[in-house]
Image (tube, grey):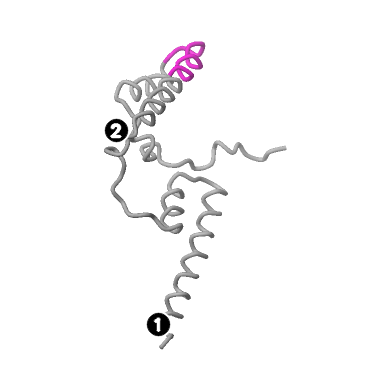
């Protein structure tokens, strides 16, 4: 028997959007998704599925035009694994967040040790 509902654990901030979500977000779609909890119980599943279908269509459109995608992409240098884990951890909750935090601490410790070893070399 489960002692607690895993969905009751602290979830990532609802205002936080992944870079992909930012690229596919459209005002009308966001408004539809915000309205779903206010629809009748029988209509909510259909609206939720419809909103996900619209997101999928937008994602397909976005990635089917490489020229448009390159204009929308971030102009950042290649990220390190540490930077990637830090970014991903913003969207984690509960045990996943704890595991990522431990991984980040371990990686930071190894980087510090590596940096010290490089300084000690003649």
The residue that appears at 53% across and 59% down in the rendered structure is 103
Q: CA distance from mark 2 to mark 1?
A: 45 Å
Which numbered disc, 2 or 1, marks the residue that appears first in the sequence? 2
Asked which quadrant contains residue 55, the reply is top left
Which dot marks residue 68? 2
Q: Split into 4 quadrants, where in the image is the C terminus?
A: bottom left
Reply above or below: 109 against 97.
below
Near-viewer residue (84 or 41): 84
Q: Is residue 28 left or right of residue 48?
A: left
Which dot marks residue 69? none
Q: Which residue carries the number 1 mark?
A: 119
Question: Magenta residues, as a range?
Answer: 39-50
Near-viewer residue (100 or 93): 100
Near-viewer residue (55 or 104): 55
The residue that appears at 51% across and 50% down in the rendered structure is 97
Q: How many numbered circles are shown?
A: 2
Near-viewer residue (24 or 102): 24
Residue 104 appears at what percent x and percent y? 49, 60
Viewer-nearest of discs 2 and 1: 2
Task: Mark 2 and mark 1 in contact? Answer it, CB < 8 Å.
Answer: no
């Amino acid at each position: 028997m489960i002692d607690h509902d895993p969905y009751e654990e602290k979830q990532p901030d609802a205002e936080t959007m992944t870079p992909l979500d930012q690229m596919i977000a459209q005002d009308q779609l966001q408004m539809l998704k915000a309205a779903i909890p206010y629809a009748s119980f029988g209509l909510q599943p259909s609206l939720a599925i419809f909103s996900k279908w619209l997101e999928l269509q937008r994602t397909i459109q976005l990635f089917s035009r490489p020229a448009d995608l390159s204009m929308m992409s971030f102009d950042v240098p290649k990220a390190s694994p540490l930077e990637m884990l830090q970014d991903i951890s913003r969207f984690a909750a509960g045990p996943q967040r704890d595991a990522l935090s431990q991984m980040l601490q371990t990686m930071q410790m190894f980087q510090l040790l590596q940096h010290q070893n490089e300084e000690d070399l003649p």
